[in-house]
Amino acid sequence: MRLLVTGGDGFIGSNFIHYWFGRHPKDSIVNVDKLTYAAVPSNLDGVGKYDYEFIRGDIADKKLADRVSKDVDAIINFAAETHVDNSIASSERFVHSNVVGVHTLLEASRKHEKRFHHVSTDEVYGALPLHSSRKFDEKSAYKPQNPYSATKAAADHLVNAYFHTYRMKLTISNCSNNLGPRQHKEKLIPKAITNALAGRKIPVYGKGLQVRDWIYVLDHCSALELILRKGEYGSTYLIGANQERRNIDVVRQILRELGKPESLIEYVKDRAGHDPRYAIDAGKIKEELGWRPKYSFNKALRETIKWYVGSSAA
Ligand SMILES: NC(=O)c1ccc[n+]([C@@H]2O[C@H](COP(=O)([O-])OP(=O)(O)OC[C@H]3O[C@@H](n4cnc5c(N)ncnc54)[C@H](O)[C@@H]3O)[C@@H](O)[C@H]2O)c1
């Protein structure tokens, strides 16, 4: 199999490339990444021993998208602007990469009749009330509430519309919050770990009561592999590991694991329009594709901490 991975220098894309080569060492991967501030090229240390090619470029570049799509068996799109806070400050780049970029990849996939999987987020469904047992599923209505999630929702709509219009080999996955190695330090868990290790304050929005449904990044990767191989064209799959945690409890657990004091927590003004809770019902991918997550939250957090401790010592 020859795969085109976009955004492979980011958090999930790089874990996916390591995961894929670990399981399919004879396959080849072309990674197209613009290398924005969020890219960490060292995330891909070690892949040179495989059939791997890196191309620095923008998924919204039509000529590039056309050229790199031609000779691959499948395309999996991770490339995106991903930080909600940045999208609140200015959303132009988000529209460019997350909407125009996906449209460009869809056009290239259409021209060359390629299998295309789009990696999306549960944030497209908006938020759930804090105190409820409701979860998002494939029938939930789209209701994005910040510029980041609005651009991801727009891309999902394009993918669905392309399926209905052109009957292409398309699938979408909407995953909950990932944790694991190689995530940019701007995000909650890496920031909490690296700040705690350095003895710096850890900013927590509001009172930290927002709830996120956490999944280890390698469990996300195994779900993506199944969808790529067996997903039904035109389908959306929600991915989550049923591990809801309040942000403040996640930060406290990190401090406990590292033996650091809770006085490092610094409550800061809440994010504008902060979604209170996300939660995923992953019943469809479990029933239809037989997917099961392997990592408990505690194990995932320990693996993640171990990786950041190792990389801060290196
Ligand atoms: N991190 C999560 O918890 C999570 C959860 C669900 C879904 N997702 C989705 O998964 C995907 C990957 O997320 P992540 O956390 O790894 O993001 P990330 O910010 O760590 O990495 C994004 C990568 O995309 C690249 N990129 C950005 N714009 C590009 C463009 N126009 N052309 C080419 N490359 C470009 C960046 O350079 C970077 O390497 C995103 O689509 C995101 O919406 C993330």
Image (cartoon, rainbow, N blue to C red):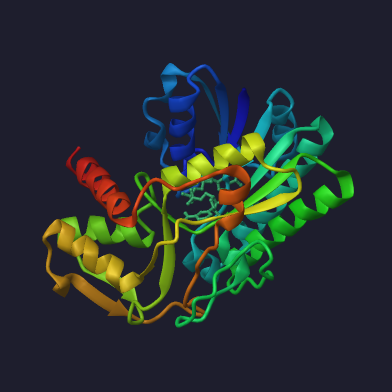
Seen in the image, is 229 located left or right of residue 274?
A: right
Q: Where's residue 206, x and y in %?
A: 36, 81
Q: Where's residue 116, x and y in %?
A: 70, 39
Above-or-below relation of 309 to 17: below
Who's the residue at 65% across and 73% down the image? 143
Q: 214 or 28, which lies in front? A: 214
Q: Is residue 6 visible?
A: no
Who's the residue at 49% across and 76% down the image? 133
Above-or-below relation of 228 to 271: above
Seen in the image, is 57 located left or right of residue 73?
A: left
Q: Quadrant of residue 45?
A: top left
Q: Where's residue 197, x and y in %?
A: 17, 56
Q: 151 or 290, which lies in front? A: 290
Above-or-below relation of 276 to 10: below
Q: Is residue 124 visible?
A: yes
Q: 47 or 41, which lies in front? A: 47
Above-or-below relation of 161 to 248: above
Q: Quadrant of residue 312?
A: top left
Seen in the image, is 131 located left or right of residue 124?
A: left
Seen in the image, is 241 located left or right of residue 231?
A: left
Q: Quadrant of the N terminus?
A: top right
